[in-house]
Image (cartoon, helix red, strand yellow):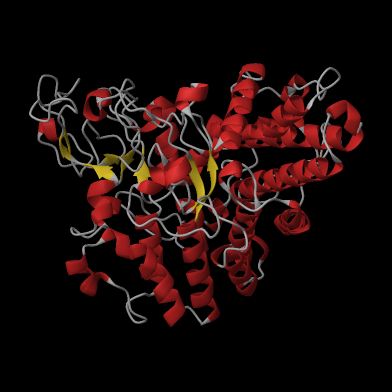
Amino acid sequence: MKNLINIKNILFVVLVLFSSSCTKLDETVYSSITSTNFYNNPNEVLSAVLRPYTHANAWAAPTSQRSYYRLNELSADQLAWPVKGIHGYDNGDWIRQHYHTWVTSEDNIWNPWSLMYTGIGYCNDPIKNLQEYDLDRMGITEAQRNQYIAELKVLRAWHYLKLMDLYGNIPVVTVVGEPLSPPTQSRAQVFSFIESELKENVGLLPVLSQQYVGRITQAAAYSMLAELYLNSLVWTGTERWADCISACDKIISGAAGGQGGGVATLDTDLTTTYKNTNTTASKENLFVIAYNYQLTTTRCGWNSDFYHFSQQYIYGGASNGNDGVVVIPSAYDAFASNDKRKTTWMLIGPQYYYTDPTKAVTGSYEYKNQQLVFVNNIQRNSEGSIVSNMNTGEENSGARFNKYNPGPSTDANYWSNDWVLYRLTDIYFYKAEALMRQAGNVATTEAVSLINACRKRAFSDADWSTAAYTTTSLTMDELLAERGREFIFEGKRRTDLIRFGKFTTASWWDHTPTGNANLNIFPIPQRQITANKNLVQNPGY
């Protein structure tokens, strides 16, 4: 635990040194890191190594940025940011996301690109410096240098994996500013680069343990390889199911370590994975964005996107939100009434004060001075209207985010929840899907066992006999539906829909399919095309 706290102390130093860089999105952001008077001791070296982690907060989690997270969720079939009365229009940004009518010039397309390439710069800079600087100057050993470089290369590969997911054909840059106008590479070329970086460096990484919570370890690298191989058919045209299974087995076997020490195991309930104590309590988390609000005063600020204007009264905290993202009615309905995820991970119905469960929380606009009641529809109920679309919401529209709970402000661990990027449940689902696809899209006994091991947590013992999957009931469509239920709010849904062939062909709530396969990848941002003549726009844009 002492080592873990030291790491988070260093993260605090990093935030102080580079606090402006996560929000300043100019083209010369890489130059904000200067090294001539840095790397003079082990703490300065570690600060540089950890800098990309603090920046990942901006794009990989719901922290109010126009981010990878928003693009991957608000374009899919579970979450939306509808207009609610006078709030939420935001230049039509979220409406275009939902209806798949985005354009090349909008910030929602450009900001994730900028944020992730900035993160790549924060990886490239210390890689170069670690390779060039004298060990005596830095005060580290050759083994430490090699481990740091491997860690940064795998972290960089993760950035490229997510960029490739969104934009397909992208440039690969491994040295800051070289070349100044990097050319577009095909998705298959980018895939090969990511794969080689992960495979070449995974063996140089430590296994996951408490000391390395929030850092790149073998568990994180094998999780990335498993995700890469699971999506290989989409991203390269070549299936890699056997390789996906092999990467999953590295984690399931315990060879890659576990956050609780030894072998990673599934958490036995629905809340431990996401609690404000999940740094030490969760046994299944494999790679997280680490937070300690008490030590560093930083947190995952999901409240801005998800929380109502009066949410602080509901959970007993100090932060409200913009009353933005809600669960789409059809996504809420996809949960069975006896599925405990429906009542644990989402808020719906009448809302009361945390400090007084008999006192009603009241609304601010359509329901001012009336009890706030979250409803499973998006329509102007106060006006008696049943029209339901992205323009017809009210302040109480839609079930709400409750998967992560910060605890009340009096809690000793208030808002210290780590944001989970990969967990053992991901690996069970990855392997099960690869097994089914290997078997001609038919469930095998092992695939059913893997999914049931995760699903069982969501049902009472009395309900489990009818809720458990069989090789007959676990179809590919049902697997996609169960993925939606299990990973709701986790930033994965668009990628899943594309892999299952549903992103541009399926209907949900008021969204009708476009049938345009070009929309499976986003356009290269127009301002990047303007700035770099060597970039090639994606087909259809």
Residue at (53% x, 60% y) in the render: 263
Q: How many marks?
A: 0
Residue at (39% x, 55% y) in the render: 267
Q: Is residue 100 visible?
A: no
Residue at (15% x, 42% y) in the render: 386
Q: Is residue 414 left or right of residue 227?
A: left
Q: Quadrant of the N terminus?
A: top right
Q: Quadrant of the C terminus?
A: top right
Residue extending farthest left? 358
Find residue 130 and report its horizontal and vertical position in percent. 84, 35
Residue extending farthest front? 2
Taking depth in this image into account, of 308 and 285 the one nearest to the observer is 285
Find residue 43 and report its horizontal and vertical position in percent. 73, 26
In this view, 374 is above or below 23: below
Taking depth in this image into account, of 21 and 200 the one nearest to the observer is 200
Q: Is residue 411 left or right of residue 265?
A: left
Q: Is residue 24 left or right of residue 252?
A: right
In this view, 180 is above or below 348: above
Q: Is residue 25 visible?
A: yes
Find residue 238 and report its horizontal and vertical position in percent. 67, 70
Find residue 471 and report its horizontal and vertical position in percent. 37, 81
Residue at (76% x, 41% y) in the render: 148
Taking depth in this image into account, of 437 and 313 the one nearest to the observer is 313
Q: Quadrant of residue 9?
A: top right
